[in-house]
Image (cartoon, rainbow, N blue to C red):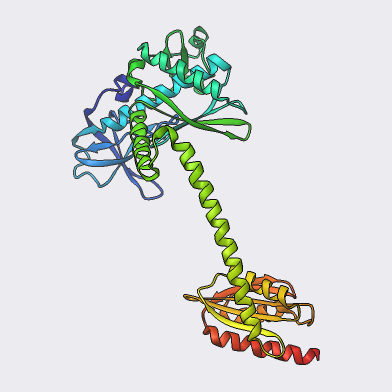
Amino acid sequence: MENKLFYQDPYITAFTAKVVIQGKEDNGNDYIVLDQTAFYPTGGGQPHDEGTIENIKVINVEEAEGEIRHYLESELDDIYSTVHGVINWDRRFDHMQQHAGQHILSAAFETLFKHKTVGFHLGNEILTIDLETENLTEIEAEKAEQMANKIILENRIIDVKWVSEEELSRYPLRKETKVKEDIRLVIIPDFDYNGCGGTHPKATGEVQAIKILEWEKQKKKTRVQFVCGNRVIKQLSQKNKVLIELTKLLNSPEKEMPKSVTRLLENGKNTEKELEQTLEKVLYFEARSLLDHSTEKRIVSEVFQNRTIQELQKLARIILTEDEKAIVLFVSQNENRLQLVGARGSADRVSMKRIIGDALTLIKGKGGGSDSFAQGGGEALLSADQMLEYLMEFIQKELLKNN
């Protein structure tokens, strides 16, 4: 472990080292290995450190085949020289806060309610833990958060010990360790004892705060989203900006926001319902007009521009309700696509599914339906007028056969 400077001191921000390997992986990615490094590699739910080596950006750090590989944005000029590395401290300290906060919150849930943590993810914005419970109540979440923040406020020491497998029995571990040698324990005395390979601050006070955001059921577990440290301030700032904007838009104080939003949604639903009713009336008058101008065989045909297929279907159904002997053929051109609707009443036995299906082959289209009502769409390889002319010729032939 001597070459892992992040274990010797997680507060190291700069170091010097020698390049001992410059390699290439099977996927073509170049990397270097140093004789010692302060860059933490991805592992244990914690993302890798970022920073620079000789002012070249470190884009990834992974541990593979017993070595820590640093993936750089570009190659080093002299691979055998002594190099200078600099850690992105803001990212490192953020990960230290989040990881320690996770230990504290997980321990709080287990101490209070016996809810074990069986999963952990440290993301760029939030953290999640998966608790071994199907139901997490608001009271439980609130009490766990309160205990976690109490431990932070007490500024307890966060101790790190390297122990053997035989020595583990001395400690009341929160969960069994996965490794059997070089076991690293992260300890908050009289509160949490846990095997962990991540970086942590020296005291709980540096975590600053923990805030649970929300939780949801995941199969037989509960996934809890939360933030720690500076992320709490960031979340508060973001949410405060949103609230300020909403208070201006709704002309309502913060405490009255839920009522204002509820009222706005209800008004929106009422307006939407009124629009639907108005549209129904407009479609009814449009249907009557189309029927009045239909052919003697009661064929209602029309070309439209930029009408949705749902609207055409509704219009066709209204026409059939008004005249069950009618036959409907609609074509709408929507930019570079054609939409087709064909429908008939009970008077004739022509198959609209076959007619529309045949027409769709001309425009590389897809559709479906039944013998009495079919629809579909495809590329505008024909004009809308040409397509309607084709449909009219087809229906005329079908009507002659049936007569």
**Residue 366 visible to the viewer:** no
Q: Quadrant location of residue 384?
A: bottom right
Q: Quadrant location of residue 386?
A: bottom right
Q: x and y percent of residue 72 in the render?
A: 28, 43
Q: x and y percent of residue 120 in the render?
A: 49, 30
**Of residues 310 and 398, the one drawn nearer to the viewer in this rendering:** 310
Q: Is residue 319 above or below residue 6?
A: below
Q: Is residue 281 above or below residue 157?
A: below
Q: x and y percent of residue 310 in the render?
A: 60, 67
Query: Which quadrant holds the N terminus?
Result: top left
Q: Quadrant location of residue 277?
A: bottom right
**Of residues 148 and 220, the one drawn nearer to the viewer in this rendering:** 148
Q: On the rendered structure, is 244 left or right of 337?
A: left
**Of residues 44 and 23, the one drawn nearer to the viewer in this rendering:** 44
How many discs mark residues in the rendered view? Answer: 0
Residue in the image at 54% along x and 86% along y: 385
